[in-house]
Image: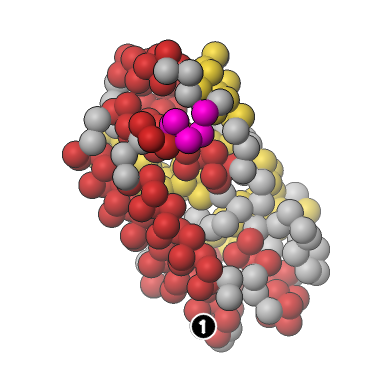
């Protein structure tokens, strides 16, 4: 475990990097940089939030959990976001399961330290209020998508969002993880992924995915991909202004 730099490096979390340098300089001593592994659970619904996490080059999936076993992805967080934003609204318990989808680095801060700084840092307040609004908008759209749209379109939407978060056409994600994210059985993911591969939109082997026709994949995806993307883009433009 190591302390973050006095100012965010070029590949640091974008939320933190958008803070005024004077505010970040004061916050820097409170952050640690740690490495997280794929499949690692950072928080569970109903458990006390110990740390807030700001991914640098990792990707975190946010899963709603029903009856302790059924799950549905309601968002994903890369270098543009954070885990634990509800602390800004006074919550102490996690509302979702946060699972590492792609291993990498995260900057973390203890809840008590964050809350103390949040109460006296206006730039942090503005940033977090905008970001929580973005998360809510995306979660609502994903919930609608999950209820009304076919699995193939939902899988296409999930792969496109993952591409956007990682800024790469190639990434690793297993059938099992996609099944948890989409709230379906693995056989359903297998059939949907095979259909996308037969249309020459993706290649998929042993969890290694490459998007080979992004425009075609977006055409197959439901409109929710564009809506989720637009909500994030417009909100981030304001947050980073």
Q: Estimate how packed mark 1 is, as few (under 14), some (14 to 19) or many (20 or more) residues with alpha carbons within 10 Å.
A: few
Q: Is residue 180 in view?
A: no
Horizontal side, residue 204 vs residue 96: left or right? right
Query: Is residue 215 rendered magenta in the image?
Result: yes
Query: Which residue lies at the image location 45% right of the left edge and 71% below the top edge?
Result: 130
Query: Which residue lies at the image location 56% right of the left edge and 49% below the top edge?
Result: 78
Q: Position of residue 157 (x, y in %)?
A: 39, 38
Q: Position of residue 223 (x, y in %)?
A: 32, 45
Q: Is residue 132 in view?
A: yes
Name the foreground residue: 13 vs 160: 160
Q: Which residue is mark 1?
A: 119
- Tell me which secondary structure the magenta stretch mostly adopts: helix
Query: Is residue 97 rendered magenta in the image?
Result: no
Q: Is residue 158 shown above or below 205?
A: below
Horizontal side, residue 16 vs residue 25: left or right? left
Query: Which residue lies at the image location 55% right of the left edge and 14% below the top edge?
Result: 206
Q: Position of residue 177 (x, y in %)?
A: 44, 28
Q: Is residue 42 shown above or below 128?
A: above
Query: Which residue lies at the image location 78% right of the left edge and 53% below the top edge?
Result: 2
Horizontal side, residue 175 vs residue 25: left or right? left
Horizontal side, residue 138 vs residue 88: left or right? left
Q: Is residue 158 shown above or below 113?
A: above
What residue range appears in magenta? Answer: 213-217
């Amino acid at each position: 475990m190591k302390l973050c730099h006095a100012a965010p490096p070029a590949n640091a979390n974008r939320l933190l990097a958008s803070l005024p340098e004077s505010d970040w300089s004061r916050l820097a001593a409170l952050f640690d940089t740690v490495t997280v592994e794929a499949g690692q659970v950072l928080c569970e619904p109903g458990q006390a939030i110990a740390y807030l996490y700001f991914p640098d080059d990792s990707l975190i999936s946010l899963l709603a959990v029903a009856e302790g076993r059924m799950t549905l992805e309601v968002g994903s967080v890369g270098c543009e976001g954070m885990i634990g934003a509800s602390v800004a609204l006074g919550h102490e318990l996690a509302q979702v399961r946060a699972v590492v989808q792609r291993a990498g680095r995260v900057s973390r801060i203890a809840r008590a330290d964050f809350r103390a700084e949040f109460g006296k840092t206006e730039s942090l307040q503005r940033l977090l209020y905008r970001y929580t609004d973005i998360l809510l908008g995306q979660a609502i759209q994903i919930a609608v998508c999950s209820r009304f749209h076919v699995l193939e379109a939902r899988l296409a939407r999930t792969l496109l969002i993952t591409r956007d978060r990682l800024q790469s056409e190639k990434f690793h994600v297993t059938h099992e993880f996609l099944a948890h994210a989409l709230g379906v059985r693995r056989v359903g993911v297998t059939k949907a992924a095979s259909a996308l591969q037969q249309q020459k939109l993706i290649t998929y082997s042993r969890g290694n995915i490459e998007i080979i026709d992004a425009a075609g994949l977006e055409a197959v995806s439901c409109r929710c991909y564009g809506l989720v993307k637009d909500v994030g883009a417009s909100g981030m433009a304001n947050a980073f202004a």
